[in-house]
Image (tube, helix red, strand yellow):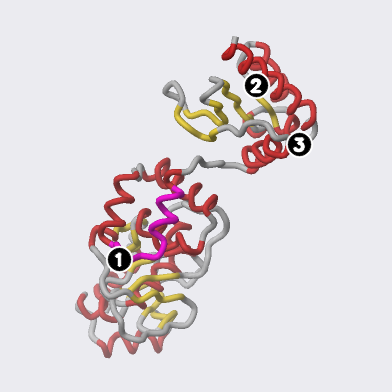
Amino acid sequence: MGSKYATAARLAWRQHGRVSPKQLVEAGIGRHEIQRWLENGRLVRVHIGVYALGHTAPSTLADYMAAVLAGGDDAALSHFADAHILHLLPGGPPPPEITVPTTAHRRRPGMVIHRVRELPERDTSTLHGIPILTAPRTLLDLAPRLTLARLGRACHEAWVRHHTTPHDFEACIARNPHKPGIAKLRRALAADVTLSDLEADFVALVRAHDLPLPRTNIDHRNDTVDCHWPELDLTIELLSFRFHATRHAFEQDVARRRRSNHIAFSWGDVYERGERTIAELAAAIAARQHAATG
C-alpha cells in the first residue's frame, strides 16, 4: 500500500496534485484500491474522472491541470486560460478552457470545452507540466473575440516572452486555413501597437489636436521607440514614473532628456499639462517640416 501510494503521490506532484483514474491504473494501482482511497479520503474527486491527491488547496494551475485531465487524451488548455498562463493578456485567471480533438458531445461542469476535428501536434506544447496550445494557435483562436488593439498587444507579448515570430503565426495559419480569425490576426501583426494607457492617451491627444499621427513601438536605428514620425525623423519617448524613486526625480529625468535634444514626455505632461505638451510637439513638428522644405 505504501509504495503504491508513494507512486501515486509522485505522479500527482508532477501534475499540481491532480491525477486521473486511467493514470493510476497505468501506474499499477488497481481500481479497488482507488475506490478505497476515495472512501478513506486519500483521493478527492474534483471532476468526473479527475482526483486530487495530497492536497486540495486552491490553485489556478491545479484547476487548469484538472480541466485538461477531464478532457481526456490529447486535450490541451486553450483560449483565455492558455493566454493567461502564457502571459499574453493582462488580468486575473479566467475559468478553465480546453480544446479537445473530437466531435463527440462532451460536457464538464466548471470549464469550457472547445471541440475540433483535429488538433495539429505542432499547435500543442507543455507549460508548467500542463498540455497547452502554442501562442500562435491561442491567438488565432482568440482573434474573433479580441479587439484589434488588444490582439496586437498580445502578439507583441508573444514575441517578447516566447520569441514568436510572424513566420510562426503564418505557419499556424497554414495548418488551420479555415479559422475565422485569420484576417484579423494578420491585421494585428501588421499594425503598430500601443502597449500602455500612457501611449494610447498620448496618441489620442495628438489626434484630438489634428497633428500628424506617429507610428508607435517600431524599430528605429536598432532601438524600439515609443512614437516616431518617419517623414520628420522625429522621435518621442513616453516615460513612466514606476522606475524612479520619487516623482520629482522622474520629472527631472524627463526634463534632462528634453534639454539634451532627446524629446520625452511624462505622465504629467500627457494628463496634467496636455495643452503645453501639444504646443511643444506642434513647434517641434513645424520646425522639422520647415527644415525639410527649406
In depth, the one of 207 and 154 nearer the eye is: 207
The residue that appears at 54% across and 56% down in the rendered structure is 147
Please state the horizontal and vertical placement of residue 77, each as a whole percent of the image.
38, 66
Q: Say left or right for 100 vs 248.
A: left
Which numbered circle lies on residue 75? none
Secondary structure of the residue carrying tag 2 is helix
180 inside magenta stretch:
yes
Please state the horizontal and vertical placement of residue 251, each as a whole percent of the image.
72, 23
Which numbered circle lies on residue 285? 2
User: Alpha carbon of mark 2 to alpha carbon of mark 3: how far?
Assistant: 21 Å
Question: Of the residues shown, which amino acid type is indicated by label 2?
Answer: Ile
Quadrant the C terminus occupies? top right
Mark 1 packing: few (<14 Cα in 10 Å), some, or many (20+)? some
Q: What residue span does the magenta drawing correspond to?
A: 176-188
Q: Quadrant of residue 289?
A: top right
Q: Are marks 2 and 3 in contact (CB under 8 Å)?
A: no
Q: Say left or right for 156 vs 9.
A: right
Residue ID for mark 1: 10
Secondary structure of the residue carrying tag 3 is helix
Residue ID for mark 3: 271
Q: Quadrant of residue 16?
A: bottom left
Q: Are marks 1 and 2 in contact (CB under 8 Å)?
A: no
Q: Residue furthest top?
A: 294
256 inside magenta stretch:
no
The residue that appears at 40% across and 65% down in the rendered structure is 180
